């Protein structure tokens, strides 16, 4: 219809007749702005910042009790019969992974662009993480090491810590850190495991998305994978941490498929709340949270009341709080000999919030300016890839995704993500471009923005 209207206008001009000014003109087709892609999804989840803040607060609480008493049994949530020995940090991270799965699946559904997703996550996550690793190794390490600052720096182990953390998103020991009698003294930053698990779930999502680009198929595939992981984790030698997190991440993806088709209902949210309470009383809160809790999490994430404007700034600090809470609490226990979890929680909250504020305003927010140039650079590379012969792209588009799943998927599930991060990302981007150009699927994940 749009082309017919433009053709009529062109014929009228060629015949010397001016088109009717009152006649409706076809809307101009403009290319999407990279800035709009960077903002996609934020206005759809106005309560997401509040959920992130709640998850970060759960880490502060759990770690304060864990570091004070050296045992998970001291966590206040474990005293509840419905918790079944799960900690506040566990439910906070379950909440976060549900919301993350929902947001990531929604981004892929709307944008169909893997490279935009990776660039967006990179500029949001990597700057704060890199600086946190440097601060931990070069500032907190010398202060906390029992060897003293000079001997600590002279030994040079801090360099291997930096390299290991940056390449694996995992923690590693530092010489003489921390110097207190607790059993967890050698754990430098116990807050990094959500990042590593988040990386693995993201890579699994992208691998499945290359093979199952439909949101419905993706939800079914992830739900099936999660069910198999829960039922037979020991048979495949899977990482226990991933076994715990994957069902909640999958629940967020499934909720994206359901909400995009049926929407959200206040009555269903009330039913989900009642069911969650009922299963909690029966002692099955963890299992019920992946089902009924997922509906409540998504319902809250899409409601503005979940994050009042006065707390919006606090929600922006959630990532920095999660990064720094563990080393700050460890340092406080060592320097002040704190064994009172309430005092440790209050002091660490103040210090961590200050560090998170500095991280957000000096690093995370300015890093968002890199989105446009990085996206332009990525688009230029993609355009060059799309000039390859169609037959070659078709072969690569069909073979590479299955190679990623069959050869590298088991390593992801077992927790061997450190050595394959860069190869998997490179293969995912190449395979996505191949699929988009060759037409192996109806809409290519990476090439779709160039067809608009």
Image: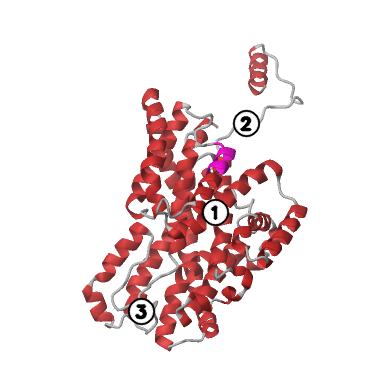
Residue farthest along the top direction in this orientation: 15
* Image location of residue 182, percent across then percent down: 39, 82
Q: Is residue 372 above or below residue 275?
A: above
Q: Looking at this view, is 128 or 417 the one in front?
A: 417
What x and y, as percent, mark residue 160? 27, 65
Q: Is 177 above or below relative to 235?
A: below
Q: Can the viewer see residue 387 in this picture?
A: no
Residue identified by numbered label 2: 28
Residues packed near mark 3 inside 10 Å, few (<14), some (14 to 19) or many (20 plus): many
Q: Residue at x 74, y 21 (%)?
A: 20
In terms of secondary structure, where does tag 2 sit?
A: loop
Label 2 or label 1, whichever comes before in sequence order:
2
Per the rendering, the mark at residue 247 is 1
Task: Give the extent of the magenta segment.
Answer: 214-221
Q: Earlier in the sequence, mark 3 or mark 1?
A: 3
Q: Which mark is residue 178?
A: 3
Quadrant, the N terminus: top right
């Amino acid at each position: 219809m749009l082309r017919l209207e433009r053709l009529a206008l062109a014929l009228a001009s060629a015949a010397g007749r001016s088109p009717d000014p009152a006649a409706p003109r076809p809307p101009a087709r403009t290319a999407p702005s990279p800035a709009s892609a960077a903002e996609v999804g934020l206005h759809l989840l106005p309560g997401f910042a509040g959920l992130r803040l709640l998850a970060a607060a759960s880490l502060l609480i759990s770690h304060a009790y864990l570091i004070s008493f050296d045992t998970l049994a001291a966590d206040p949530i474990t005293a509840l019969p419905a918790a079944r020995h799960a900690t506040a940090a566990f439910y906070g991270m379950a909440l976060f992974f549900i919301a993350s799965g929902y947001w990531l699946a929604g981004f892929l559904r709307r944008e169909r662009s893997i490279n935009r997703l990776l660039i967006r996550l990179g500029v949001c996550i990597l700057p704060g993480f890199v600086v946190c690793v440097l601060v931990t190794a070069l500032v907190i390490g010398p202060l906390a090491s029992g060897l003293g600052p000079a001997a600590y720096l002279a030994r040079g182990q801090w360099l291997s810590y930096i390299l290991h953390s940056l390449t694996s998103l995992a923690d590693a020991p530092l010489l003489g850190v921390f110097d207190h009698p607790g059993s967890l003294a050698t754990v430098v930053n116990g807050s990094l495991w959500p990042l590593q698990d988040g990386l693995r779930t993201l890579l699994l999502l992208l691998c499945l998305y290359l093979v199952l680009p439909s949101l419905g198929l993706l939800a079914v595939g992830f739900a099936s994978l999660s069910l198999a992981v829960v039922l037979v984790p020991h048979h495949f030698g899977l990482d226990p941490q991933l076994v715990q997190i994957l069902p909640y991440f999958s629940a967020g993806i499934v909720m994206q498929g359901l909400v995009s088709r049926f929407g959200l209902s206040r009555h269903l949210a009330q039913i989900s709340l009642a069911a969650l309470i009922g299963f909690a009383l029966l002692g099955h809160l963890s299992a019920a949270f992946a089902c009924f809790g997922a509906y409540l999490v998504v319902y809250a994430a899409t409601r503005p009341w979940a994050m009042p404007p006065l707390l919006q700034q606090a929600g922006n600090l959630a990532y920095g709080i999660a990064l720094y809470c563990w080393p700050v609490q460890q340092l406080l226990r060592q320097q002040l000999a704190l064994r009172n979890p309430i005092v440790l929680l209050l002091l660490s909250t103040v210090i961590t919030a200050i560090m998170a504020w500095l991280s957000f305003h000096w690093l995370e927010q300015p890093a968002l300016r890199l989105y446009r140039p990085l996206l332009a650079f990525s688009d230029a590379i993609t355009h060059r890839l799309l000039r390859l012969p169609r037959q070659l792209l078709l072969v690569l588009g069909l073979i590479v995704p299955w190679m990623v799943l069959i050869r590298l998927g088991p390593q992801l599930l077992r927790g061997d993500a450190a050595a394959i991060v860069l190869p998997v990302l490179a293969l995912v981007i190449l395979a996505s471009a191949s699929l988009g150009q060759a037409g192996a699927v109806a809409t290519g994940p990476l090439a779709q923005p160039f067809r608009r």
